[in-house]
């Protein structure tokens, strides 16, 4: 038998044989240092400068209308006549099992009081919960076969935004800006427009940059009529004085900044951005210069739709100026203030839809008439759906085995339904779509290759889609 390995006889032979390994370790360390220097060098310049995509892109920006808490697919875009017929009965064993947080073992199926109608040339069925959005179905791809891995809010929200079920990983907004930079010179590249009622269970970490450099973190705007404070120059300070002050601060800071201090570099970039926003961006947040017809379209000035209408209109204005990723959030604070209908699905969803239906439809209408829908990918959805069984007598529990998300614009082929759940809405059975497939499709439309969009972290090339997703080719 051929000898493959010979035991070393003394220390000199051991050092001789190990020399190649030591050299490899040193070479690996040198490569890591070189990569860190390259990243730092990029940040010292303009890390948010526009970058070429990996392939020709259909979309330039993304607006994610996040319906926090988990809207019910059976009450919105996925009609289930059999569920109504079986109302009050136990789930037939043929449909299989499901794990829930709060549904009791003896729970009964809960039919829906919503009615469905076909709309548009495509004839897609939409419930009367969304009378405005229903008229935009020919621009929308309704994905009825979504599924995720987690049935609790925080973990499901992390997976929806970051592809992982734990905090600490970059959100899709941060990944997009890391891959493409920003075309906005005087505005943040990635903006979250939070719900005025408060944060969600996963909190700010689900939107955050994780281990990506701090320059790719989101800018959290404030709820209400003043999303950004202190946009005016201080009294008695001229524009030229402000410019000279910031120039001096930057010069002094750079004198002591280490070459690889990414956090410090991000801070300097934020100072520059704040100055540009003070001098150039106030008009973006002043909706009074919009025609009254546009304000009426979004429902601004009406009690139910004013807040979300303002944020959807602001999202349009932001992407119009080159902002790369915008997330207007519907739902925040305690459970029933989100789409989290544990107690009463009717009361909750009627209230939440009344706040969001007209603004969401207006956003699609406004983008399209301005020629922006072709280059703006709009995504609508939450972290999961709701259970076919009732929780208590009128509510529905969290449900991750099958639910609906919507895509429109950005090269997406509208007017189609993709995939299906079973006859009671329990499980995705036709063309199932995981969150990582949603992420992969978003990246694809932006011209980004999911494998090439990676970042070396703790010795591993990390990416948004983890173990790789699939582009939903029928939609693009």
Image (cartoon, rainbow, N blue to C red):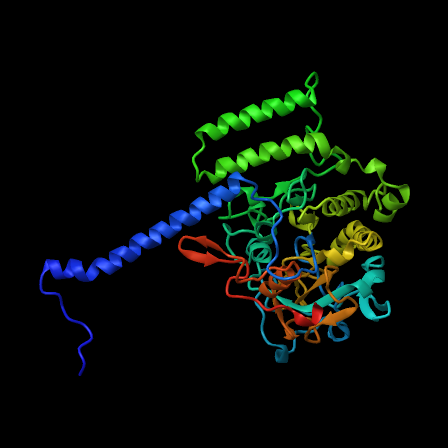
Q: Is residue 114 visible?
A: no
Would residue 444 appear left or right of 79 to someone viewing this image?
Answer: left
* Of the pair 347 and 199, the residue shown nearer to us: 199
**Quadrant hosting residue 71:** bottom right
In the rendered view, tell whether residue 307 sits above or below residue 434. Answer: above
Question: How many marks are shown on the rendered structure?
Answer: 0
Residue drawn at point x = 81 percent, y = 69 percent:
125
Residue 315 in the image, given as x and y percentages of width and height: 74, 46
Residue drawn at point x = 57 percent, y = 41 percent:
46
Residue drawn at point x = 71 percent, y = 26 percent:
232
In the rendered view, tell whether residue 312 sits above or below residue 432. Answer: above
Would residue 197 appear left or right of 217 to someone viewing this image?
Answer: right
Residue sticking out furthest to the bottom: 1
Residue sticking out furthest to the right: 293
Residue 340 in the image, given as x and y percentages of width and height: 67, 54
Residue 261 in the image, given as x and y percentages of width and height: 45, 38
Q: Quadrant of the C terminus?
A: bottom right
Q: Quadrant of the N terminus?
A: bottom left
Residue sticking out furthest to the left: 10
Q: Is residue 268 visible?
A: yes
Residue 280 in the image, given as x and y percentages of width and height: 72, 33
In the rendered view, tell whether residue 175 sits above or below residue 391. Answer: above
* Of the pair 148 and 407, the residue shown nearer to us: 407
**Quadrant hosting residue 11:** bottom left
In the rendered view, tell whether residue 257 sits above or below residue 426. Answer: above
Would residue 273 appear left or right of 312 to someone viewing this image?
Answer: left
């Amino acid at each position: 038998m051929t000898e493959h390995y010979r035991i070393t006889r003394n220390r000199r032979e051991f050092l001789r044989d190990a020399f190649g390994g030591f050299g490899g370790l040193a070479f690996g360390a040198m490569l890591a240092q070189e990569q860190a220097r390259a990243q730092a060098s990029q940040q010292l310049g303009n890390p948010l400068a526009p970058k070429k995509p990996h392939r020709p892109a259909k979309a330039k920006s993304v607006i994610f209308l996040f319906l926090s808490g988990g809207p019910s697919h059976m009450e919105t875009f996925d009609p289930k006549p059999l569920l109504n017929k079986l109302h009050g009965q136990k789930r037939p064993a043929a449909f299989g099992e499901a794990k829930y947080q709060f549904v009791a073992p003896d729970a009964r199926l809960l039919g829906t009081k919503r009615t469905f109608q076909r709309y548009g040339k495509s004839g897609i069925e939409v419930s009367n919960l969304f009378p405005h959005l229903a008229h935009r179905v020919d621009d929308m791809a309704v994905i009825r076969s979504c599924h995720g891995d987690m049935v609790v809010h925080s973990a499901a929200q992390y997976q929806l935004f970051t592809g992982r079920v734990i905090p600490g990983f970059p959100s899709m907004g941060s990944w997009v800006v890391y891959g493409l930079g920003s075309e906005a010179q005087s505005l943040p590249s990635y903006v979250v427009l939070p719900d005025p009622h408060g944060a969600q269970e996963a909190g700010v970490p689900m939107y955050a940059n994780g281990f990506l450099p701090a320059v790719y973190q989101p800018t959290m705007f404030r709820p209400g009529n003043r999303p950004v404070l202190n946009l005016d120059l201080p009294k008695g300070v001229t524009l030229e004085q402000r410019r000279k002050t910031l120039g001096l601060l930057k010069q002094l800071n750079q004198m002591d900044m280490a070459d690889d201090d990414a956090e410090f570099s991000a801070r300097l970039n934020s100072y520059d951005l704040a100055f540009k926003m003070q001098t150039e961006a106030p008009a973006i947040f002043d909706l009074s210069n919009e025609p009254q017809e546009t304000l009426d379209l979004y429902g601004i000035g009406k009690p139910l739709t004013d807040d979300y209408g303002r944020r959807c209109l602001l999202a349009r204005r932001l992407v119009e100026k080159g902002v790369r990723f915008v997330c207007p959030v519907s739902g925040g604070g305690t459970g029933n203030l989100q789409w989290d209908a544990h107690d009463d699905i009717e009361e909750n969803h009627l209230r939440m839809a009344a706040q969001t239906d007209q603004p969401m439809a207006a956003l699609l209408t406004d983008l399209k008439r301005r020629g922006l829908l072709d280059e703006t990918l709009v995504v609508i959805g939450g972290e999961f759906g709701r259970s076919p069984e009732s929780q208590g007598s009128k509510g529905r529990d969290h449900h991750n085995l099958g639910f609906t998300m919507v895509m429109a614009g950005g090269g997406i082929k509208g007017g189609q339904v993709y995939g299906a759940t079973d006859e009671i809405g329990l499980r995705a059975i036709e063309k199932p779509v995981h969150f990582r497939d949603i992420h992969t499709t978003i990246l694809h439309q932006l011209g980004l290759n999911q494998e090439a969009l990676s970042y070396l972290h703790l010795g591993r090339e990390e990416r948004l889609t983890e173990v790789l997703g699939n582009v939903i080719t029928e939609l693009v």
